[in-house]
Image (tube, rainbow, N blue to C red):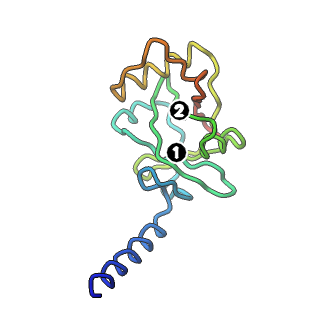
Amino acid sequence: MRNVAAATSILVAAIFLLAACSGPMGPIPGGELDGEVKPWPTDWGFTEEFENALLETNPEDPYSVTVWGVAHHNSFYITGASVDSVWVSNLIKHAHMKLSFSGDLFLGRATEVTNRDEVVAILDQYVAKYDFERSEGDNFIEDGGVIFRLSER
């Protein structure tokens, strides 16, 4: 009986801790991101030290997730494997977003990348940064993926 009470107390404490956190926790989505709003960067090179970024979509009902992203030609890009994911469909409906690195918030807008040369360049950046291989016949966009270029609001 004592073990059940202790487990229940731990579970309740964990739920309160999760509820107190506004952003996502790993793969679990969150709500509004907290932090200090900073000017939009002109050089995204600092992002090379970060494996993940936090992304908030849907300003009316904030929804945040952890994403991978890469810098390329003074822009920052994120990818989604499916247009059916909540955050991707949110960005397609409403382009305004927040991006967070260690509590620094950047307010921006997302534009879907459709130019084939730009798509290939961004996928190459992902391969280099995240150390995975892309198959020769990889058709990320044709297979339902999406790439967003982020820019200042």
Please, what secondary structure does the residue beneath circle 1 have? strand
Of the pair 47 and 83, the residue shown nearer to us: 83
Residue 79's disc is: 2
Q: In the rendered structure, which disc, 1 or 2, sits on the residue that comes first in sequence? A: 2
Of the pair 37 and 19, the residue shown nearer to us: 19
Relative height, residue 143 to residue 102 (above, below): above
Task: Give yes or no for contact between labels 1 and 2 (Cβ–Cβ under 8 Å).
Answer: no
Of tags 1 and 2, the one toward the viewer is 2
Q: From mark 1 to mark 2, how far is it between C-alphas?
A: 13 Å
Relative height, residue 139 to residue 12 (above, below): above
Of the pair 79 and 43, the residue shown nearer to us: 79
- Give, as a three-letter code, the residue at label 1: Leu
Mark 1 — residue? Answer: 99
Please, what secondary structure does the residue beneath circle 2 have? strand
Question: Measuring 54% from the left and 35% from the top, which residue is drawn there?
Answer: 80
Where residue 85 appears, as percent x and y from the top left, is: 59, 42
Q: Outermost residue toward the right?
A: 93
